[in-house]
Amino acid sequence: SQGDERSVHDNDEPIVSSPKPQSCKNLILYLITFAVLAYGAIFLLCISPERTYFCDTGENIMTFRPTHACSPCPKNAQCDEGRLACDAYYESSRDGKSCRERSDILDSR
């Protein structure tokens, strides 16, 4: 009887399940998606222009700021926490570094 048991166990082969083709395709799709998203994020970070940090209105350029230097707040603007807000009747220039008279006001003259 013991001989029979040994022969049964000796003939047992471990069952190895191979990955299903569908799960391999899904894994590849996930990896490709991740790679494309990561590459896109890195690309956007590299090409995005560096934001100008403006000194708060009334603060001068020599004021000590341990984290970053600031640019003087432009004419016709108020600056707070590094951000530029153009005064009434003015709009931000394309580069975002100055304020110009609004085009609708210039057109009405």
Image: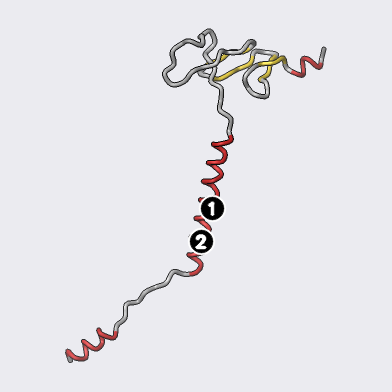
Q: Amino acid at mark 2?
A: Asn
| Residue drawn at 39 percent across, 73 percent down | 17
The coloring applied to the image is secondary structure
| Residue drawn at 41 percent across, 18 percent down | 66
Q: Quadrant of the N terminus?
A: bottom left
User: Would you call the spot at circle 1 few (<14 residues within 10 Å), some (14-19), or many (20 or more)?
Assistant: few
**Considering only vertical position in the picture, is 48 above or below 29?**
above
Left or right: residue 73 compared with residue 107: left
Q: Position of residue 9 (x, y in %)?
A: 25, 84
Specify the label residue 86 is tagged with.
none
In the structure shown, which secondary structural element does the residue marked by tag 2 occupy? helix
**Considering only vertical position in the picture, is 33 above or below 13?**
above
Q: Amino acid at mark 1?
A: Thr
Cα separation, mark 2 vs mark 1, equals: 10 Å
Q: Quadrant of residue 71?
A: top right
In the structure shown, which secondary structural element does the residue marked by tag 1 occupy? helix
Q: Position of residue 97 (x, y in %)?
A: 62, 19
**Of callouts 2 and 1, the N-terminal one:** 2
Q: Position of residue 88 (x, y in %)?
A: 67, 13
Quickly name the residue at label 1. 33
Specify the label residue 26 is tagged with.
2
Q: Quadrant of the C terminus?
A: top right
Q: Position of residue 73 (x, y in %)?
A: 57, 13
94 or 5, nearer to the observer:
94
Left or right: residue 3 compared with residue 39: left
**Considering only vertical position in the picture, is 3 above or below 65?**
below
User: Would you call the spot at circle 2 few (<14 residues within 10 Å), some (14-19), or many (20 or more)?
Assistant: few
